[in-house]
Image (cartoon, rainbow, N blue to C red):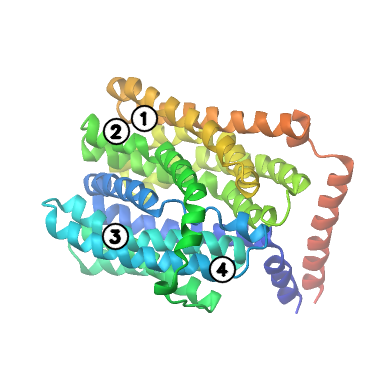
Amino acid sequence: MNVKRIIRRVTDNDYLFTIFTKILAVLIGLVASFYSNRFLGPQLKGELGRISSLLSIVAVTANFGLYQPYPYYKRQGEPDVLNQFLRIFLLQFIVYTVIGVIGAVCFNSFELTAVCLLAPIQVLANQLSFMMMVEDVKFKNAIFFTARITNTVITILAFYTMDRTILVALALIVVGDVITVVMALMRMKRMPNPMKADLRFAAKIVPFGFVSMITTLMLTLNYRVDTLMMGYMYHIPDTEIGFYSLGVSLSEYGWLIPDAFREVLFSRTAKDDAIEEVTMSMKVNFYLTLLMILGILVLGRPVIRILAGAEYLPAYPVTVMLIAGIIPMSYFKIIGTLLLAQGKKGVYLGMLSASVAVNILCNTITIPLWGKMGAAVASVVSYAVAGFVFLGYYLKTYQIPLSAVFVFSPAEKAKLTSKIGAVKRKLGKKKAV
């Protein structure tokens, strides 16, 4: 009974439930990494990194950012806003599927064919995932969790039953996107007719959406431009890109805590500014992320040996370099939710564009000099620019002292102590029983 109550407390709290599902996803992801890294090897992993980076850029561009205005219009009380957006998204999917099939037939390139066929479903999956983050963040995490489990099972089966091929990795992308689409539509209990999409409403949100698309494109470039430049501009070998991709994957475990806060705050700031909650989130995130970074530093090398094998050890220096940018970039992730919900897309885009420009400029200098390590250095510099610019804007706009995002007030300490004490009491009762 006590166990059920503890579980209920976790699932009732959006933050705890989100962090809990992220941790479970890490455990499942570690199992998947053990098999996928060995199944692909560094060279195919590098090729996959190039294709997935190109796919992300195409999917973001084709999206036109039309999902980004959803929290704003929901906050403004737009009538039937959910169905209006769904109709537009489904119509986009139909049009892009037709275009994608035609493109796949016309292009004489495996990489371009793969991107043409995968982009339509990824566009729709990204749109519905964003909507679920606003509507029901806990179910969004359930979708994420389900996709991870399914992909892990498929990866294990492929490892034991199939020859080494990149097609399996591409198939996993499709499976994850399909699961997202199906579960989101089932949860919303809606399947509106795309032929009845309100094109006037679509035209109304295009200006907002276009700027948001550029914003999301800048965000994607900030994470992906290094891989694209290594592969297509400087022709770094796929094996080296494979090492870099693994280093990025390991460092991304440090994003779990900031992403958990970001997802919950999307739902919170869709209703009001929630400044106190945003500031508190940054404080808790800072200390939890420090622990996560310490764990990656200590366990990174043995984890690479276990999950990928000794052939991937050149990925460890990349991991160490990249985790230096986790904390500053977490400020960008958390504060960015507030700016988007307020409709301050221009401010958001301007500060983010500066970070991307720094990233590209640094890459043009550092990649020719140091290869994959140069790309890691450029990423850290751009993360620092983005994070500290956003933090400075937030502190200045709301007249918040710098100490407020690091130091807990007596009232906040008492609140945290009370919550921790409640959990201990629950666990104590369980032992007594």
Q: Nearer the viewer, residue 79 or 226?
A: 79
| Whether label 1 touches label 2, CB < 8 Å | yes
Residue 376, percent across and down? 40, 31
- Which is nearer the N-term, disc 2 or disc 3? 3
Q: Confirm or deny contact between disc 2 and disc 4 (CB under 8 A).
A: no
Lower position in the chain sequence, tag 3 or tag 1: 3
Label number found at residue 118: 3
For badge 4, the amino acid type reads: Leu
The residues tagged by marks 2 and 3 sit, at their Cα atoms, a distance apart of 22 Å
Q: Earlier in the sequence, mark 1 or mark 2?
A: 2
Q: Give the mark nearer the N terminus: 2 vs 4.
A: 4
Whether 395 is drawn above or below 279: the answer is above
Q: Position of residue 205 (x, y in %)?
A: 51, 54
How far apart marks 4 and 1 lie (CA) works out to 40 Å
Camera-near label (2 vs 3) is 3
Label 3: few (<14), some (14–19) or many (≥20) C-alpha neighbours in 10 Å: many
Between circles 4 and 1, the one closer to the viewer is 4
How far apart marks 2 and 4 lie (CA) works out to 38 Å
- Looking at the rendered image, the quarter that the C terminus falls into is bottom right
Q: Residue at x 44, y 63 (%)?
A: 199
Cβ atoms at labels 3 and 1 below 8 Å apart: no
Residues at marks 3 and 4, CA–CA distance in whole angstroms: 25 Å
Residue 229, labelled with which disc?
A: 2
Residue, x 30% and y 27% (percent of image)?
Answer: 371
Q: Earlier in the sequence, mark 4 or mark 1?
A: 4
Residue type highlighted by circle 3: Leu
